[in-house]
Image (cartoon, rainbow, N blue to C red):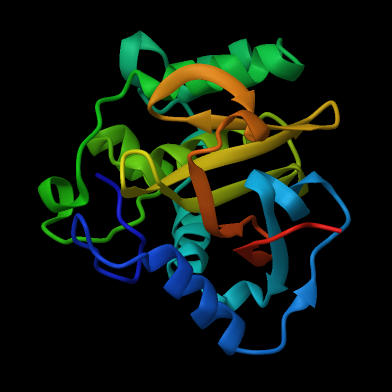
Amino acid sequence: MCTLKATPRRPGSAPVCALLALLFLLLGAPQPAQADGFGKIFGTVAFQRPKDVFAPWLEVQSRNSASSIFGGGTQLKGGKTSSTLLSEGGSLTGMQRLRFVNSFWNNYPYITDMKNWGRQDYWAIPREFVGKSGDCEDYAIVKFFTLRALGVPSTAMRIVVLKDVVRKLAHAVLAVEEGGEIYILDNISSAIVPHSRLTQYVPAYSLNEEKAWVHLKGRAK
């Protein structure tokens, strides 16, 4: 089960997503969200926050930059290397590329942070994911950096940390803009669907390489 990083969570605990969102707002005056589909993802209103508001994500970017799997022929699952993965993915565009990346990494087994790292919360870089697999946010991270290596701009993607109100647990997914629609790459399914179809997801915050946002339920104008 995924947890909201930087805040331990037990099954059945208080709505941590909402509490974190409130905390992010209290850290400073929010700025209006950018005028794109991400600003109202999952029926919420997004407020921009300083990118350093979430230290674990900054650490992931720094560690990944120093140890990227895409700088050579890192061995991956199924006999592929990172080079062949990029070669195959590079021949695809649009939804085919998203499905390729989502399906490839979803073949890795789900492993909890406690089992992998002996701690409740840990955000793994792709090199660590290749060696040990991971949980929901680790899938989102490796898909994010794979698509970046395939030329998808950071501004077209968000790692979204959210609450699944049906399963009653915290979760993380990758949201990608493609053809004017926001699609969700999820480790629990190989199907890629628009965010509007996943009504059980209530986001707390989202991130890309440049910025961070907090999300609150409400009517986007």
- In the figure, 141 relative to 80: above or below? below
Query: Residue at left 49%, top 63%?
Result: 57
Identify which residue is drawn at 64% across, 55% down.
Answer: 208
Residue 83 visible, this orientation:
no
What residue is drawn where x is 64% and y is 35%? Answer: 195
In percent of width and height, residue 79 lies at: 34, 10
* Residue 94 shows in this picture: yes
- Relative height, residue 209 to residue 75 (above, below): below
Q: Which residue does the image show at 71% across and 62% down from the upper left?
A: 46
- Vertical arrangement, residue 8 with respect to residue 36, above or below: below
Q: Quadrant of residue 3?
A: bottom left
Say if 110 sits above or below 192 in the image: below
x, y percent for residue 139: 41, 37
Q: Nearer the viewer, residue 47 or 157?
A: 47
The answer to whether residue 89 is left or right of residue 33 is left
- Residue 219 percent coordinates (x, y): 75, 58
